[in-house]
Image (cartoon, rainbow, N blue to C red):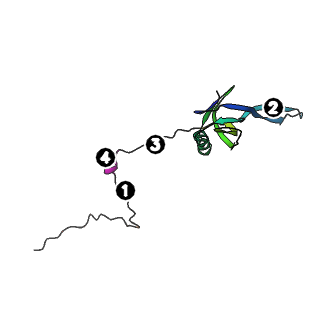
């Protein structure tokens, strides 16, 4: 049985897969073209079929996945990992008891995660440090060594 995340899908009528790649072309000195780099594009799957859902919980869950951009795995004849739901449309009909017809578009995405480093200061160290205060323009104090106290006789 096909599964999208944790939602079982009872019947798939049609599944179409698409994907693309891009290649960079450059001309050599004699004008001959050369391709030196190929980059794989995204994979997309369009699915349509029927879902049996008496309570509407599957529809609500799939709509929430779409709205939140949740990463899902799609398991059918081929597996699509890290997929998001781009489109999820449903049609209610009297011909389908306790369910509905759906069309859905899934796209595989690549997620880049960069871990940052954060240094925290212990609470004890925070208490020992003072915040700098802006005192404005202050003239430095001069130390005068020639000042002596004179005793009166």
- Label ID, residue 124: 4
Is label 4 in a helix, a strand or a loop? Answer: helix
Is label 3 in a helix, a strand or a loop? Answer: loop
Q: Find out whether the residues at labels 1 and 3 contact each other: C-beta distance under 8 Å.
A: no
Q: Which residue has dot 1 on it?
A: 131
Q: CA distance from mark 3 to mark 2?
A: 43 Å
Q: CA distance from mark 1 to mark 2?
A: 59 Å
Q: CA distance from mark 1 to mark 3?
A: 21 Å
Q: Find out whether the residues at labels 4 and 3 contact each other: C-beta distance under 8 Å.
A: no
Q: Is residue 13 toward the left or the right of residue 62 in the image?
A: right
Q: Who is closer to the viewer here, 62 or 85?
A: 62
Indicate which disc, 1 or 2, sits on the residue closer to the N terminus: 2
Picture coordinates of residue 31 (x, y %)?
Answer: 89, 35
Nearer the observer, disc 4 or disc 1? 4
Q: What residue do we see at 56% from left, 39% from top?
A: 114
Indicate which disc, 2 or 4, sits on the residue closer to the N terminus: 2
């Amino acid at each position: 049985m096909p599964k999208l995340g944790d939602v079982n899908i009872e019947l798939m009528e049609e599944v179409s897969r698409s994907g693309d790649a891009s290649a960079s072309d450059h001309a050599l000195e004699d004008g001959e073209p050369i391709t030196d780099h190929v980059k794989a594009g995204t994979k997309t799957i369009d699915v349509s079929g029927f879902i049996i859902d008496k309570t509407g919980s599957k529809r609500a869950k799939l709509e929430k996945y779409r709205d939140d951009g949740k990463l899902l795995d799609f398991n059918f004849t081929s597996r699509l990992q890290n997929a998001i739901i781009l489109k999820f449309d449903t049609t209610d009909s009297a011909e389908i008891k306790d369910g509905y017809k759906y069309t859905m578009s899934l796209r595989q995405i690549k997620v880049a995660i960069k871990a940052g480093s954060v240094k925290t200061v212990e609470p004890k160290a925070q208490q020992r440090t003072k915040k700098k205060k802006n005192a404005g323009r202050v003239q430095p104090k001069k130390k005068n060594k020639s000042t002596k106290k004179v005793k009166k006789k």
